[in-house]
Amino acid sequence: MTGRILRTIYGAAVVFFLIAPILAILPLAFTDSIFLSYPINGFSDRWFRELVANETWSRSIVNSLIIATSATILSTSIGTLAALGLRGDRVPLAGLLRTGFILPMVVPPVVLGVGMQILFVKVGLASSYLGVIVAHSVLCVPFVVVTVSASLAGIDPAIERAASSLGASRTRTFREITLPLALPGVVSGAVFAFATSLDEVILTLFVAGPNQRTLARQMFSTIRENISPAVAAAALLLIVGTLVLAVLGAVLRHRQARPADTA
Amino acid sequence: MNAAGLRSAALVLPLVLFLGVFFFWPLATMLTTAVSDDAVGKAFPTTAAALSSWDGAVPPDAAIQTAVATDLRVIEDRSVLGDAVRRLNSAVPGFRSLITKTYRTVRQNDDAPVDLTAIDAQWGDPAVWRGFARAVPPYTDRNLLAAVDLQRDAEGDIRQVGEAASANRIIMVRTFVIAASVTALCAAIGLPYAMLIAGAGGWVRTLLLLAVLLPLWTSLLVRTAAWVVLLQNNGLVNGFLQTIGLIDHPLPLIFNRAGVVIAMTHVLLPFMVLPIYSVLLTIPSNLMPAAATLGANPLRAFRHVLFPLVLPGLMSGSLLVFMVALGYYITPALVGGAEDQMISSVIAFYATGTANWGMAAALGIILLAATLALYAVYGRFSRTPPGFGV
Amino acid sequence: MDAFIRFENISKAFGAQTVVDNLDLTIRRGEFLSLLGPSGSGKTTILMMLAGFVAPTQGRIRLDGREIQGVPAHKRDLGVVFQSYALFPHMTVSENVAFPLRMRGVRKAEISERVTRSLDMVQLGKLGARRPAQLSGGQQQRVALARAMVYEPKVVLMDEPLGALDKQLREQMQLELRDLHRSLGLTIVFVTHDQSEALTMSDRIAVFESGRIEQIGPPEEIYDRPQTRFVAEFIGETNVLEGTVVSLEKGVARLSAGDGRTLLARTDRDLAAGQRLLVCVRPERIAVSDDPGAANAIPVEVADSVYQGDHIRLRLEGDGVSLVGRRDRSRADVPTGTRGYASFAPDDCALVDA
């Protein structure tokens, strides 16, 4: 009996430890004070208006959207192709390639950032949108490869053989069978990629110029130098954005599984 | 390679090229930057060639002295010369004024034969020539040595850097200590929690898992900012402790070691819990009851049955947390004080602060090597535990 | 004999391993041929080569005279039913069955009609709008069948399609498949490792072992007149007795077994004296009596008798041999410890190489 009580208390304590910080900061988005602290004496939406009115903030939000969208498109397309190629280990050195594609997740971002900064200056990509998009894509690609690969692995290979035996050529099998079945994984990968890009700070610190400041980069500076409830407002925005994305992704995957209308 | 293999290779190629150019090339660039030292070689090509056959005599023969003059007369790009002068000056202080003077003199009278010691007596100092000769080769170990607080003295032997300058080792030790503390804390909190999840069913398990996954889905910046809110002097934690009368004055919980460790533990806990939990899932749920029927009390059953089986998960979780914590930048930067900066901060400082790419790259390589070594070990641990031959 | 499908000198090696070894096989039009054998015997590989998913290392495959080993799978116009059914999870049952018709460019109205007919044929007419995940194993199997036959292929290949079904459903499906075969006049090539299944359904059985065909023939021939020890032991139960040939007279071989016993076996083979051979007898052919003069009588004691529902399984020990016998429930009981003679007629056994 005591064991049970202790376990419940412990579980609750850890859950609290994990969730409370996130819940703690969100209400401060609505404070009317200029301090990021409790108690909240008055509620207002001034900080959301600040995000829109203040050019630095609004610019950074737009930049984040542009960069995240572009990085998602780039990493999802290249990553999906690679996952398709890795399938069944038909390509030589498949194991080595798989490890190589995951490495961007393993390497400390600061190290990669330094390397990229040195290289980008040399090739003229420093302080450019393209440079930041490319840097983000490098970070996003492993997520896409892993998610799409997992989704592909769940497809029974006999299904594609069946399609073949029923008269479908290779392209038709891919279009009608493989792609639709892999799509949920691709959508998940894209959602992961977008969220990763939105959250990315370190590489941006090294390769972005003042014109490519992202929301995350701006939040970082603000927390460091002059913390204000604008950060809480931005945080709420990020959380809502990520949630919308996750829901969108889930809806897309669910609709994929529904029967299409046939005559 | 058959047709299928060729098709697969074509599909994989774009990513291989993309990462080759934008991931491996930057890392390779960093490697070369850490060991490259071509500033002097670029500005003084003739001298470099001549010095390769220098016999050590001071002052060196006419050929070498003429080479120096030639290079100074020929060079047009001021920034290249500037880089070289900076490099020489950091080896032997006073080089800057020496070169400036020599530069002006030899350019005033072109083609006249040169006697460098006549221009300035410093050219007779063996240390000057030794410093010059050592700065000439395009590759150097200066940065790598400096990264671990070593340097070469005038004779070329390796020795420690003086007290004032030796910060890197301290920072490396500090990074290790912080990472280790965070790992230990994550293990202490995470292992029981993972066992709780594995033992729970239905909605409780979902709730416990959600609590672990939700932070992963939230932006790292948001989580770190949240800890600022909680730990600051007028933050929620201090407010709570004061309200219940435990303390009178706010505890310093932020911008110090405590804040960094707490915040990093919070961020990295999921990376400990999830590997342990996935290993626990592979353990048949009837093992502990079986141990009980054989006479083991819960503690002994845990020690002899469950713990050995969960150990691989604990090891891979710990390796993962440690590996990530080593390279961590954001959280220590935002929540730590001056005494809590980890090696990644130093790297960033050298890169974006003082533009000392060599040092940044050298430190980066050390961090990268440590991370890759840990990853290799992690890779071996996260294979399925033996005996469950899946 | 109508040689509809021919395998000529077919071999398949995966790396250093030879999975099919210089095989010749002729399949007749309209027959139900089972490829029977243990795992790894090569039977599935043969089917996969016929379907076009695996290329032979050497040899030729002919379908109705045409060489097809180089023809890609999607152009072979065969029906294939897979072990895992391989239904398309993202399509409904109707869409699954319509798929091959779409690939062939059939008109929409005609598709709809043929799909309905095909589903009715497998008694799934009402389930067209369901998804495979919503169906039971047996229903999925029928959808797979309907899909493979809706475009009326001349040959249907089946790779252990009934393996995942429980016993009762399996036996029911076996009979249904047999009926379908008879009514549609299809050629069916059926891979299985279950010998009773092969015996039930086939016109001919090809028994595979280590990449070769040990014996091919109608079920009765395979069961009653096995030509090798492997076939004798793989199909049903068998007792094996060793003997050396003494003489051969009017189609009956006389062999001397251990301890001066004599064995008599009918055979149409040419034998030489001194040849060492095996006599294979099915348990149900062994009679237990107290007559020492019966043909092939061996003195035994009933060591064990186990109730099996429709019969009793006897273990008969004696004279250095251990035999398995069978006692029908309708006959009198033979209690453990009874001493007697186990005997069998020379016509009721098979002579195979040692």
Image (tube, coloured by chain):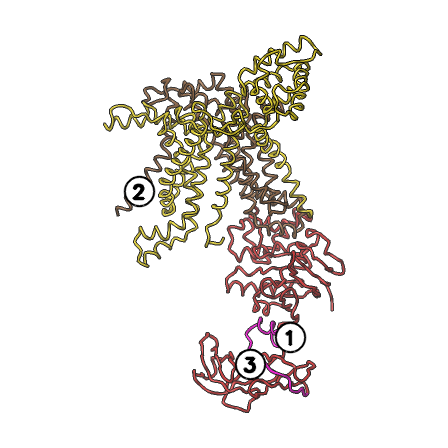
**Mark number displayed over residue C218:** none
Quick check: marks 1 and 3 in contact, CB under 8 Å? no
On the question of residue C5 being in view, the answer is no
Residue B361: quarter of image: top right
Check contact, mark 3 vs mark 2: CB within 8 A: no
Query: Which dot marks residue C227?
Result: 1
Task: Look at the image and give the colour of chain B.
Answer: yellow
Identify which amino acid the numbered label 1 is placed on: Gln
Frontmost of labels 3 and 2 is 2
Q: Secondary structure at mark 2?
A: helix
SS at badge 3: helix
- Can you say whether C306 is above or below B50 in the image? below
What crowding class fits label 1: few (fewer than 14 Cα within 10 Å), some (14-19), or many (20 or more)? some
Q: Which chain is red?
A: C
Q: Earlier in the sequence, mark 1 or mark 3?
A: 1
Image coordinates of residue A244 in percent, x first then y, are 47, 31
Q: Residue furthest right?
A: C65
Front residue of B321/A216: it is: B321
Q: Are marks 2 and 1 in contact (CB under 8 Å)?
A: no
Say what amino acid the circle numbered 2 marks: Thr
Label 1 and label 3: CA atoms lie apart by 18 Å
Which colour represents chain A? brown
Which tag is nearer the camera, tag 1 or tag 3? 1
Which residue is depicted at the point 45% across and 81% down?
Answer: C303
Per the image, the residue denoted by label 2 is A8
- Residues at marks 2 and 1 on the same chain: no
Tell me which segment is drawn in magenta.
Answer: C221-249
For this orientation, the residue located farthest to the top is: B108
Q: Which residue is mark 3?
A: C285
Give above or below for A135 relative to B189. Answer: above
